[in-house]
Image: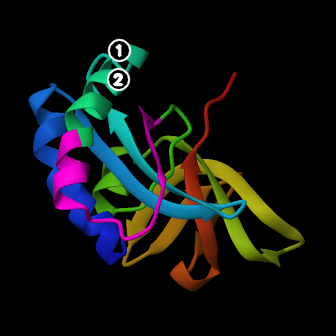
Amino acid sequence: MNRIEKTVWDLAKPVVEGHGLELWDVEYVTEGGQKYLRLYLDGPEGVDLNACEAVSRAMDPILDEKDPVPDSYIFEVSSAGCERALKRPSDFERFLGSNVEVKLYSAVDGAKQWIGKLVSYEDGDVTIDAGGQRRFERKQIASVRLRMEM
């Protein structure tokens, strides 16, 4: 998490919790030459459009006053989604036993994408059961996301 994301996290967390929700992630990225500041939310009953709008309206004056982002940006608030990225150790602990998709920087045994049940997370290394246990080191992993089976 970079400095801007950490600052926005600290500003947004009490606002989001005040709406009975959980702040899942903060993302500050450049896409197509445009900067985006995104909040991802979760909640016990999920997150709907009204909840996103309420958090967005509550955050607007705070972001205007504190001005944590030096550049012009687009502000978005959305649900973390059912196929959310797992980033923090607590994310992995929470979803042990769940189906995940692990994307790698380089192919291992001919594949850069592995799908299986999350078995363990230790110091950034991820072990999944994909018809046999596979352990991937932190340096190999581009991303890990929950994977919904249809």
Residue 50, numbered label: 1
In contact (CB < 8 Å): disc 2 and disc 1? yes
Classify mark 2: residues with Cα within 10 Å, few (<14), some (14-19) or many (20+): some
Q: Is residue 88 left or right of residue 21?
A: right
* Mark 1, secondary structure of its residue: helix
- On the rendered image, what quadrant is the C terminus found in? top right
Residue furthest right as drawn: 110
**Is residue 144 covered in magenta?**
no
Q: Nearer the viewer, residue 44 or 47?
A: 47
Residue placed at 37% from the left, 54% from the top? 26
Image quadrant in which you'd find residue 15:
top left
Measured from the top left, where is residue 128 in percent x and y?
57, 58
The residue wearing badge 2 is 53
Measured from the top left, where is residue 116 in percent x and y?
64, 49
Examine the rendered structure and indicate whether residue 37 appears above or below residue 141: above
Magenta stretch bounds: 61-80
Query: Tell me, what colour scheme is on the image?
Result: rainbow
Q: Amino acid at mark 2?
A: Glu
* Mark 2, secondary structure of its residue: helix
